[in-house]
């Protein structure tokens, strides 16, 4: 199968959906001729023109609000939020307006809106261009949240997001844009709420999101050399969450670790760990482990920044401690 | 302005009736609250009927509006029915939003009302987005964004007006300046020339007496036609007044505005009384005919209130319905 980059996968998904549905359009900063700073949307304006690939002023709340209204009246906007950190700028329009329209109107209004943005530290971009803020949007009923971990997922989830009749936040790992994966030429969609079991194992379940999926897979490889077989699961969408696949796995392996690049406090790792504790407690041989980003603003200095995100080594070390029953020695 | 033919006369009487209906709706909603039959918050727009009706009478049902927390008047003016509105205010399942939105989120999609909004200025983006849809899909729909003077403090408004101007969207931004944002006078919150906030973006702006329904309607007719023709966006500043407090519970208001001021607006600048006088002077309607309209409107409101009081609440199973739209 051919391999394409995550960036190309996103681009293809959007192009295909725009060809399929003339009411789909892109709105954001420098999305047209510039193709975004990450060049993810390069070439789209040549095919679809500036009527459908629309450059906006630097007005994130404004263009998000406009997309909400456009979505409510018969179009399918895709908004490009250049950095995930800018979610803070658009929270009212996203969470008070888009997320609640269906409910507040008793189902009369809908907001088929896709907001694509990104996460990920270690790009030396410091505290306001490095955050992984998906937990914020996962907290809000009415939003769906997709987190692709490779080019394959990026394409399939993006197409599903665009076709969904609800506001979907799709968050890409900005450090993975140039990473390639096998992506079919023919059309496919990845349904929301279906986790992918990426590696089978019997000793521990590693549940990893987005950027952390590669970390989990590499850790599993290292651990396999020691005879520890980790099962690796990518939920792919956090809302809706495929709880069944996670719980089934943990009941089998009896141990679980959740790895996510968002801050650990009050975040995704805590939520998923709690659900596992609720539904697999009697199957557990060890407390569910949480591995999130440090609870500090992302520092610029490279030596400091590297300390803030979960690493393969940290995961391997923690898994060994869990499996060998010496968790509290390293805590 | 004079009545030139029978159609005009009917149109004038419809305007009168719509203003009356808003006043009756608000009076009844106020009573429901004061008598403890309605819970929560509600905000009355009595006094602002000319602005609401004057604009909406220029629109088709396919045109869009977005409204505010003070949104009953816009909803009525855009064609909503009393029964579904009172049901909504009382949280009943037959309400426009199955009781889930309430006073501050009432929406009437069938008549192009994309909803009241409890975030001040929060619907500016939605209205502008509706205008963008119209342009992108090659439709002729116009989107009117209603907001109060309080929303002039919100940055969102300026972001979307900028884009609406850059992209020549068929949007009309209608600021009902009722002089108070909550409990604070506009002069303490908005610096400079209010219309200049729009003209700075190259948006044609008009300021006029918001108590003169025919003046508002006449301007709206012109701007709506021009917006349909691609000449938008526009900004309209309507000077008006709210008779009630910020919300139904805001009873003692003398710390922020005088009783004399309130009386002056009610006695001398009431939009319904002014228009009623004009209708009589023009011999479009007699006092008696106007009274008949009033009585009919009162009876309609009373019947709708009685219906809504007896209507069913949503089934408890609805609590987690409609969080997400079902995909087609």
Image (cartoon, coloured by chain):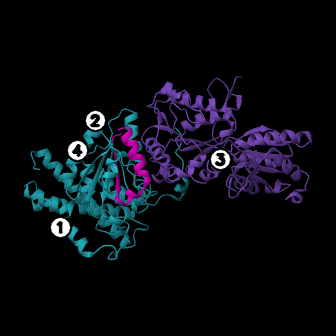
Residue B68 in percent (x, y) is at: 38, 56
Q: Which mark is residue A125?
A: none
Q: Nearer the viewer, mark 2 or mark 3?
A: 3
Do tags 2 and 3 sit on the same chain? no
Q: Earlier in the sequence, mark 1 or mark 2?
A: 2
Q: Earlier in the sequence, mark 1 or mark 4?
A: 4
Outermost residue, front side: A301
Does residue A103 appear in this view?
yes
The residue singled out by tag 1 in the image is: B268
* In magenta segment, residue B296: no
Q: Residues within 10 Å of mark 4 (few under 14, many from 20)?
A: some
Q: Secondary structure at mark 2?
A: loop
The residue singled out by tag 4 in the image is: B221
Q: Nearer the viewer, mark 3 or mark 1?
A: 3
Residues at discs 2 and 3 in contact (Cβ within 8 Å):
no
Name the side, left or right, on which A135 lies relative to B275. right
Instruction: Judge by depth and name the residue closer to the eye, A294 or A14.
Output: A294
Q: Secondary structure at mark 3?
A: loop
Q: Residues within 10 Å of mark 3 (few under 14, many from 20)?
A: many
Residue A164 in percent (x, y) is at: 55, 39
Quarter of the picture holding the C terminus of chain A: bottom right
Instruction: Judge by depth and name the residue closer to the eye, A69 or A36.
Output: A36
The colour chain B appears in is cyan
Q: Which stretch appears magenta?
A: B143-170
Quarter of the picture holding the N terminus of chain A: top right
Question: Residue at position x 79%, y 39% from top?
Answer: A217
By secondary structure, the bulk of the magenta-drawn segment is best described as helix
The residue singled out by tag 3 in the image is: A130
Question: Residue at position x 19%, y 64% from top?
Answer: B269
Q: Residues within 10 Å of mark 2 (few under 14, many from 20)?
A: few
The residue singled out by tag 2 in the image is: B229
Q: Residues within 10 Å of mark 1 (few under 14, many from 20)?
A: few
């Amino acid at each position: 199968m051919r391999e394409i980059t995550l960036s190309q996968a996103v681009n293809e998904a959007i192009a295909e959906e725009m060809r399929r549905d003339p009411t789909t359009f892109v709105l954001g900063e420098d999305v047209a001729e510039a193709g975004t700073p990450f060049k993810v949307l390069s070439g789209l304006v040549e095919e679809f023109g500036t009527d459908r690939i629309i450059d906006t002023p630097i007005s994130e709340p404004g263009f998000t609000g406009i997309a909400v209204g456009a979505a409510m009246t018969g179009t399918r906007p895709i908004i490009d939020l250049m950095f995930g950190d800018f979610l803070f700028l658009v929270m009212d329009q996203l969470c008070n307006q888009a997320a609640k329209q269906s409910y507040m109107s008793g189902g009369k209004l809908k907001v088929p809106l896709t907001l694509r943005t990104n996460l990920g530290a270690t790009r030396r971009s410091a505290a306001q261009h490095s955050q992984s803020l998906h937990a914020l949007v996962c907290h809000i009923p009415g939003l769906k949240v997709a987190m692709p971990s490779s080019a394959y997922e990026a394409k399939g989830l993006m197409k599903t997001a665009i076709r969904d009749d609800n506001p979907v936040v799709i968050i890409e790992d900005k450090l993975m844009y140039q990473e390639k994966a096998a992506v079919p030429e023919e059309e496919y969609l990845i349904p929301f709420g279906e986790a992918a079991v990426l590696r089978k194992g019997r000793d521990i379940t590693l549940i990893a999101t987005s950027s952390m999926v590669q970390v989990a897979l590499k850790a599993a490889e290292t651990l396999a050399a020691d005879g520890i077989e980790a099962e690796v699961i990518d939920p792919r969408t956090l809302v809706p969450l495929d709880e069944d696949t996670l719980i089934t796995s943990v009941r089998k392996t009896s141990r679980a670790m959740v790895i996510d690049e968002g801050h650990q406090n009050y975040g995704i790792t805590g939520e998923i760990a709690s659900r596992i504790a609720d539904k697999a407690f009697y199957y557990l041989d060890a407390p569910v482990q949480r591995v999130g980003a440090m609870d500090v603003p992302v520092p610029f200095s490279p030596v400091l920044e590297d300390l803030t995100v979960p690493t393969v080594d940290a995961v391997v070390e923690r898994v060994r401690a869990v499996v060998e029953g010496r968790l509290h020695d390293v805590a | 302005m004079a009545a030139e033919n029978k159609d005009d006369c009917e149109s004038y009487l419809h305007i009168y009736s719509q203003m009356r209906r808003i006043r009756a709706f608000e009076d009844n909603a106020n009573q429901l609250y004061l008598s403890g039959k309605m819970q929560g918050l509600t905000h009355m727009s009595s006094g602002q009927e000319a602005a609401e009706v004057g604009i909406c009478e220029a629109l088709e049902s396919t045109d869009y509006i977005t409204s505010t927390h003070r949104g009953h008047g816009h909803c009525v003016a855009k064609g909503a029915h009393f029964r579904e509105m009172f049901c909504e205010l009382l949280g009943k399942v037959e309400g426009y939003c199955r009781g889930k939105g309430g006073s501050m989120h009432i929406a009437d999609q069938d008549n192009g009302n994309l909803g009241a909004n409890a975030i001040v200025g929060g619907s500016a983006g939605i209205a502008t987005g509706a205008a963008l849809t119209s342009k992108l899909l090659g439709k002729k729909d116009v989107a009117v964004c209603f907001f109060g003077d309080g929303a002039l403090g919100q940055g969102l408004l300026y972001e979307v007006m900028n884009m609406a101007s850059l992209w020549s969207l068929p949007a009309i931004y209608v600021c009902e300046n009722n002089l108070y944002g909550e409990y604070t006078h506009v002069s303490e919150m908005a610096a400079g020339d209010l219309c200049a906030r729009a003209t700075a973006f190259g948006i044609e702006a008009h300021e006029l007496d918001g108590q003169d329904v025919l003046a508002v309607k006449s301007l709206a007719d012109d701007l709506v036609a021009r917006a349909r023709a691609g000449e938008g966006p526009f900004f309209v500043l309507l000077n008006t007044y709210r008779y009630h407090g910020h919300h139904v519970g805001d009873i003692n208001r003398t710390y922020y505005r005088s009783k004399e001021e309130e009386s002056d607006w009610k006695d001398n600048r009431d939009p319904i009384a002014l228009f009623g006088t004009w209708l009589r002077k023009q011999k479009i309607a007699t006092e008696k005919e106007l009274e008949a309209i009033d009585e009919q409107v009162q009876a309609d409101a009373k019947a709708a209130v009685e219906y809504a009081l007896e209507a069913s609440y949503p089934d408890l199973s609805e609590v987690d319905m409609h969080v997400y739209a079902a995909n087609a």
